[in-house]
Amino acid sequence: MGLKFSQFDPGSIGEELSQPTKLRLRRLLDYWNEKRGNRPMPSRADIDPLDFQYLLGDIAIADVIGDPPRFHFRLYGSNLATRLGTDLTGKSPNDHPDPMFGEVMNSTYREVVEKKSPTMTRRRMIGPSRNLFQFEVLRLPLSSDGSRVDKLLIGVAFDDEV
């Protein structure tokens, strides 16, 4: 019963990126920039998931709660749930079966809240079927008042997907 559904490849926790290399994530970042205009970040009301249907199964939306911030997933895309080993819709990163992955999510999400700007990472993981795969994560802050990050829009692109 101690089997972990996913775990980091011991050789790589992650590589920070200045820009996404995956076209789907570049499109999402361009969309976010367009929606924010001259503001530091857009609000959730500015975002229409139908505008990025090409990425819907690979999107998560998390509420940012309290200070220090905690995170609660409103949405956790079906492809993310399959690839990363669990559906976190309605849950927090702490509910992921791999505690290390949950802590890395919390840490990287806190960084977005503190910076109030996007962050991007390339990662390697061992999935539920024991396959090694790589992916990029783009984390985008959203704010209903223009200054406090109250939601995160997270997009993931896997290397083996078009």
Image (spheres, helix red, strand yellow):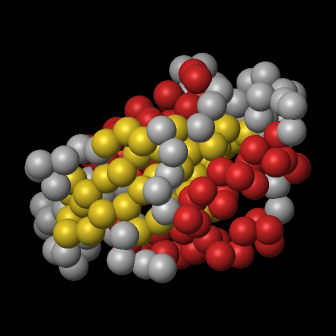
- The image shows residue 48 at horizontal and vertical percentages of 83, 62
Q: Is residue 72 visible?
A: no
Query: Could you tell whether 162 is left or right of 146 in the image?
Result: left
- The image shows residue 120 at horizontal and vertical percentages of 47, 44
Query: Could you tell whether 125 is left or right of 25 in the image?
Result: left
Query: Could you tell whether 124 is left or right of 37 in the image?
Result: left
Residue shown at 53% from the left, 75% from the top: 78
Vertically, is 133 above or below 151?
A: below
Q: Which is nearer the eye, 129 or 9?
A: 9
Q: Quadrant of residue 118?
A: top right
Vertically, is 100 above or below 68?
A: below
Q: Which is nearer the eye, 7 or 65?
A: 7
Residue shown at 71% from the left, 75% from the top: 53
Q: Which is nearer the eye, 159 or 10?
A: 159
Q: Can residue 11 be seen in this view?
A: yes
Residue shown at 84% from the left, 47% from the top: 35
- The image shows residue 129 at horizontal and vertical percentages of 21, 79
Vertically, is 8 above or below 6?
A: above
Query: Could you tell whether 25 is left or right of 41 in the image?
Result: left
- The image shows residue 126 at horizontal and vertical percentages of 21, 65
Residue shown at 58% from the left, 66% from the top: 24
